[in-house]
Image (cartoon, rainbow, N blue to C red):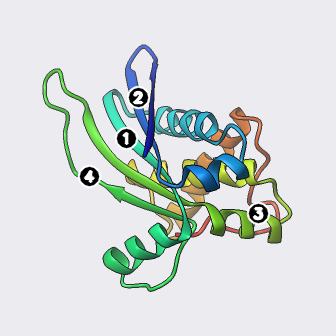
């Protein structure tokens, strides 16, 4: 396992991102700068939610085997998926961060989807991380109104990262 952290601060928010690369051979060859992009996308997404205080979250860069195992265990679906979010219901304790949860990204699925959607893997990685982090913050896309709110926030965050609107062709992030 390769791990790295990044801390970002605003006046009211501190975001600590732990990045774990569970498939370094695959990720290292596939998307240059994946770790930095994932951390920056996670921080931008959390800050955009307007939540304040100290928060910690993790991004796991994995392969389809890991995604399939987690998807089967926690969602009852025996297949890999592009992004999984595991939110924690944990309030911050004085001096300690709120633990937001984990976002798991599957590289092979990400690359296949990026190719089929005519996007770069970097664009799709940024989108999936933002999507997953917004789930950690309580956003969802089950109802139309909530889906529209989440989609607009994703577009805004991705634009701030220099990533084009992923919904131009009417496609969604998944999960």
Q: Mark 4 or mark 3, which is nearer the start of the sequence?
A: 4
- Where disc 2 sits, the SS reads strand
Q: CA distance from mark 4 to mark 1?
A: 10 Å
Query: How dense is the environment of label 3, judged by Cα within 10 Å: few (below 14), some, or many (20 and up)?
Result: some
Q: Which residue is mark 3?
A: 114
Residues 160 and 24: in front is 24
Comparing labels 3 and 4, the label whose residue is closer to the camera: 3
Which corner quadrant of the image does residue 139 belong to? bottom left
Please indicate whether residue 23 sits to the left or right of residue 54 in the image: right
Please indicate whether residue 49 sits to the left or right of residue 118 in the image: left
Residues 42 and 59: in front is 59
Q: Mark 3 or mark 2, which is nearer the start of the sequence?
A: 2
Q: What's the mark number on residue 15?
A: 2
Residue at (38, 80) in percent of width and height? 72
Q: What's the mark number on residue 88?
A: 4
Q: Mark 2 or mark 1, which is nearer the start of the sequence?
A: 2
């Amino acid at each position: 396992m390769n791990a790295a952290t990044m801390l970002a601060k605003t006046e009211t928010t501190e975001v600590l991102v732990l990045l774990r690369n569970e498939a370094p051979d695959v990720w290292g060859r596939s998307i240059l700068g994946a770790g930095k992009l994932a951390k920056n996308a996670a921080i931008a997404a959390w800050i955009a939610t307007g939540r304040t205080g100290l928060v910690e979250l993790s991004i796991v860069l994995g392969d389809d085997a890991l995604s399939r195992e987690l998807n089967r265990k926690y969602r009852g679906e025996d297949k890999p998926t592009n992004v999984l979010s595991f939110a924690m219901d944990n309030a911050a304790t004085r001096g300690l961060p709120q633990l937001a949860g984990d976002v798991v990204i599957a590289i092979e699925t990400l690359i296949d989807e990026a190719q089929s959607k005519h996007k770069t893997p970097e664009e799709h990685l940024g989108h999936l991380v933002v999507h997953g982090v917004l789930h950690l913050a309580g956003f969802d896309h089950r109802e139309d109104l909530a889906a529209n709110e989440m989609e607009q926030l994703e577009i805004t965050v991705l634009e701030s990262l220099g990533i084009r609107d992923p919904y131009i062709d009417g496609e969604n992030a998944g999960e």
